[in-house]
Image: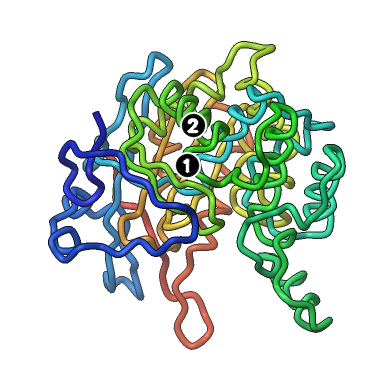
Amino acid sequence: MTQDLGTGRPGPLTTRPPGEDDPVAPRERHAPSPLGAAPVVAEVVRSGFVESVHHGIVAATGPDGSLLLAVGPVDAPVLPRSSLKPLQTVAMLRAGAVLDGEELVALASASHSGEDFHQEGARRILASVGLTEAALQNTPDRPLSEEHRARWVAEGRPPAAVAQNCSGKHAAMLAACVAAGWDTAGYRDPDHPLQRLVVEVVEELTGEPVGGVTVDGCGAPALAVTPAGLARAFGRLASAAPGTHEARVADALRAHPRWLGGTGRDVTRLVEGVPGLIAKDGAESVYAVGLADGTGLAVKITDGGERARVVVTTAALRRLGALDLGPGVADVLAALDAEAVVRGHGRAVGAVRAVPLP
């Protein structure tokens, strides 16, 4: 059984070819979304005055997959966007993708900053199966890294697929297709064998059916799952048995967090600073986290704005006992929180703060 993304009611699993317009019928456009029931999870405070609030969903699951924490409609389908990339990488490995070096496994799971080593890593994956950048079908863009983007623009270079943050994933998808003997030209199609395998893996690890399929920003299919299912999947990845593809992905993220995000990125610093933790950020303000004991966490800020995402995630980690994971964890989380500053006339006058969790 699948769910209609607009209403949350059971409905057909519909897809459209990548790149095709996806108009929303007026009836669907005005249907109430279950996300509208999300409570306030963060406040924007300026000089002691609550200026704005952000609504969101927080789901945490235990090692057995059961709910430990539920704030908001944790069973409503959402689009995790790039937070699903580690699960997609599991599917690529199951298809036979040969990624030479664990940093490339992390890159396959990344929304990277487009630093030079990220781009070279994507080229390495492609070269390993006899392909070039021309085979990439992700949306051309400039690097996410401000430094590398500025240099790119100064050099007068046009947007390129290899510089876009999903190039590692797309390169690895192509490598998986070559290994399995599948067509590479149509690898983004939801009906392609690779994308069907991705759906199988996502359903297996989340413990629920995919609630919808649409087109992600990079052109690959974007799958809908619930925050509870996303948390469950990350708990399973983080605690996977040694020797499994799931464990290989989790170990790669822990060992190479700069390949997962980039220099200075919050996801990189979170993985570096909390022992045993894996994490992946996603567009429209999603964060998914797994702890080594099998605890999973998913956060979705329902307005899609990024400024509350990190502080709600760090608050949830404290609530789940992450401070017990190491002596430096408190400092790591505090440093991430400190960046959610509110400024007036160039100086700090407040902050974005999480509402206490139950």
Q: Which residue is mark 1?
A: 190
Instruction: Describe the element under mark 1 as helix, strand or loop.
Output: loop
In percent of the image, x 34 and y 69: which residue is there? 45
Residue 215 location, x and y as percent?
A: 45, 53
Residue 203 against residue 82 in the figure, above or below: above
Q: Residues within 10 Å of mark 1 (few under 14, many from 20)?
A: many
Asked which colour scheme the image uses, the reply is rainbow
24 or 7: nearer the eye? 24
Q: Quadrant of the C terminus?
A: top left
Q: Amino acid at mark 2?
A: Arg
Is residue 76 visible in the rendered structure shown here? yes
In percent of the image, x 31 and y 25: which residue is there? 68
In percent of the image, x 55 and y 31: which residue is there? 193
Q: Is the residue under label 2 in contact with that under label 1 (CB below 8 Å)?
A: yes
113 or 7: nearer the eye? 7
Residue 196 disc label: 2
Q: Quadrant of the N terminus?
A: top left
Instruction: Describe the element under mark 2 as helix, strand or loop.
Output: helix
Residue 343 location, x and y as percent?
A: 47, 78
